[in-house]
Amino acid sequence: MKLTTIACFMGILLLSDSTTAQTKTKATQVWPVVEKQMKPWTRWWWMGNAVNEANISKVLAQYQKAGIGGVEITPIYGAVGFEQRYIDFLSPKWMKMLNHTVQQSNTLGMGVDMNTGTGWPFGGPNVKPEQAATKLIVQQYELKAGQRLSEAIKVRESKQEAAKLQALTAYGSQGETLDLLNKVTADGILNWSPEKGDWQLYAAFAGKTRQQVKRAAPGGEGLTMDHLDKNAVSQYLERFDEAFASKPQGVRAFFNDSYEVYGANWTPGFFDEFQKRRGYDLKRYLRELVGKDSVSANIARLKSDYRETMSELLLTNFTQNWTDWAAKYRALSRNQSHGSPGNLLDLYGAVGIPETETFGSSYFPIAGLRRDSADIRNVDPDPMMSKFASSAAHTAGKKLVSSETFTWLTEHFKTSFAQCKPEVEQLFLSGVNHVFYHGTTNSPEDAVWPGWLFYASVEFNPNNSLWPHISGLNEYISRCQSVLQSGKSDNELLIYWPIYDVWNNAKGMDMAIKVHNVDEWLHPTAFYQLSKGLSKQGYSFDFASDHLLGQAVVNKGLVSIAAAASPYKALVFPACELMSLATLKKAIQLAEDGATVIFQQLPKDVPGLAALQERRQELKAILATLKFGEAKDGIREFALGKGMILLTAHVEQALAKRGILREALTDTGIQFIRRSFEGGKYYYLVNHSGKDIDTELPLNEAGSVILMDPQSGAYGLAGARQRAGGLNVRIQLRSGEAMILQLNKQDSALPPWVYLGKPSAIIELNRPWELNFTAGGPKLPANRKIDHLGSWTNLPDPALQAFSGTGIYTTTFTLAQKTAKEYLLQLGKVDESARVWINGQEVGILWSIPFQARIGKYLKTGSNTIKVEVVNLMANRIRDLDQRKIQWRNYHEINFVNINYKPFDASGWSVMPSGLSGPVSIVPYY
């Protein structure tokens, strides 16, 4: 008798035969129930706000059916020729479209976020010049004894009518410093003349950057606001209050894109804020602030103080202010803090959902994974950069960490699902658990193919030839995020980020900390090297700022930042030059309260310029109280109170000595992230190496282990054996595959996972195939029979080189007897995704490397039929349009550019391989 069981995942019941599970009488819930925020969301560009209710309803239904959980509305510039359909942002008609979107999304079980503006950054028609982004303009003058300044002290730069003189500081040749602001008349005449010596005068004006909102939508055009001024931010938000009638609109979160406020290094109140926060008068140091590096030995310290002040103003006047405003509408704030001139950890930590982004592609040694040389940027996306966002969430106990995902992953129309998979997995490993595609453009029905498109998008929309299979990617992400949003993060280490070492740089003024320049501010640091090394060794960690450490407490030897967050077993300080006295004192206090504190080296100095000598003396006195013993194995210890401070260059050895163990599973090449839940833990595992792995993984935990395959949804009880200090769990992962381990303290009654044993003779599917084209364009090619598999672009029909769409391959094969434990279908080379049926039963979508599936339950003795539906990229059809000089891109503003921001032209592209190239085979396993 054939034994069956019902396996439940994502609310779907599947029947599987005895090769994968044994009989059970009822469904078992293993996968978490998928909620809308566990599905991938997408940035939804409204071009020109040219939307209507019917179009919105139709498109949202398409998104929901494909497995998208929500949309983020971001209005941008429009398509040429459709101006009569434009709707002004926040107008009554626009609000009607927003309300309809929210209502329809609620009906479909989806969510809605909204950009608090159009394009980026925040700004618009209600931003007056006095509230606009501000820059410091400094002009120099020279006077000798007895001379009077003949020139009025007014801004020389054109179009700076709104600029205000804020300081005039004179520097004498004998070291004198004078404040001359009160000597300047309203019309700019200086009523002062030096009695002796040579003098340099520095005049400081609060000028305007004059930056306009980039990629603005109708009704959103205007000046960029001053993010450092609370009143400017509040007045900007009043426009939304008026449109919303001060009532919640059903928006889940308000969004802010990465900080791209160029040249905005000032705000009118900066001098006063600096005096209040740093304790000295910045006006006396104008020469050092804007001068050459050699002007003063302390110029880096001065600029560090300037950058710290800017960071605090951005935090309080914009980030917290905007977040408080969103809360009035029962909404969260969702913010990309990177790119801003501030402490990323504090800025990310101040919002409801911190968001990172990936820009460009990464290298993965996965066999068969395409990466074109044209897609390689100056730096690859770095998981350590993404951990700044996830750390801010983890330390505060916040559930969600989002990401703008797949931005410029490849050139337009060449992005495959297989390329997306390791990129999104790298985000998951860094702590991201809420993916936003970048993105989809809303397009009306009468827009000719390929519809309306945004220039930096992955183009995941219904016009994409890959769209019929996007549910495969979406279901994978949903399964992963259902786990990664469960419970809490489970990282054992808290690592201090030495921001003062970053800020202490004499070059420039404001310092934007961006994803695009990690090779400058992140990669060269001891902090980065330590973090990379600990990760490779199998340690899990989050980052902490000085501000976050100020909130830390110790309970039973564990360090916590927030009551809702998971605690940490050790606090680690990487080698750094500068540390505030408050942070050093806090580290010592935490150790005294019972924490394990590890210094790679002790700080050498204090940051900043105020009371420098006094603070240096205090630092010296504090360090003198740390009475470390003699080094043993390169580790010096100082026990105080209930805890311990360790000083060593070898942090891994110190952790082991304190019984804080690494996860040795990383020695196999597998990467992981861990989550804890009541009664157990999850391990999300990924094999991004170039080799297949079949081994026993050591875990530092005990209990029963369930293997959960996020690619297929299958699960079963893992083969595991107890060992001292934990478990060894058998795992089989092909290069490019992922697996989730659910470790439970209680025993599980699930059927065992079926491991693939010894392979037998391969069954080659080498009979002729029927190839039928069912959807796509520019026109459907003729159906045909083919004797050998290969790219359909190589078939004797020139039209196939221009075709983007769907082809269905069908053939038969004979299985003499069905005796193996399992049968593995291997499709070989697929360009780009395949949906498989065997004997009329759907196996599933094989959308990524290694393009294989277990099919034993679908096979029968004798003749079998296999059908493989393949979708290819849009690239060949776009190439054809450009070669025929058919106009398909005509937008205002930047129009449509390529990956190098040059005018887009695909006419010179090579034809992209398409279809099923194989070889297709079935491998029996006994």
Image (cartoon, grey):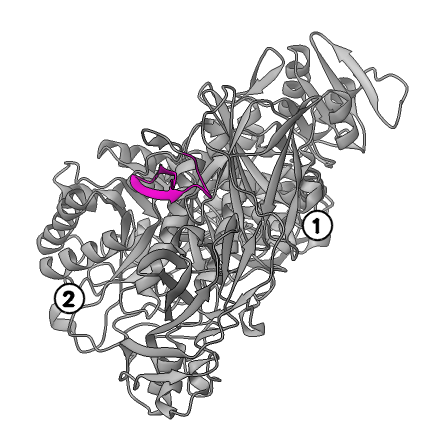
Tell me if mark 1 has few (under 14), some (14-19) or many (20+) residues whose alpha carbon lies within 10 angstroms of its own: few
Residue 17 coordinates in the image, percent (x, y): 40, 43
Instruction: Calculate the distance from the C-alpha at mark 2 to the C-alpha at mark 1.
Output: 48 Å
Name the one closer to the observer, 793 or 575.
Answer: 793
Which corner quadrant of the image does residue 254 belong to? Answer: top left
Quadrant of the snapshot with the N terminus:
top left
- What residue is drawn where x is 75% and y is 25%? 656
Name the one closer to the observer, 65 or 566.
Answer: 65
Say if 716 sits above or below 154 in the image: above
The type of residue carrying mark 1 is Pro
SS assignment at label 2 = loop
Name the one closer to the observer, 37 or 97.
Answer: 37
Residue 137 coordinates in the image, percent (x, y): 49, 56
Residue under label 2, please give it: 86
Residue 524's disc number: 1
Report the number of numbered marks.
Answer: 2
Q: Is residue 505 left or right of 781 when viewed as pictured?
A: right
Residue 862 coordinates in the image, percent (x, y): 41, 63
Magenta stretch?
1-22
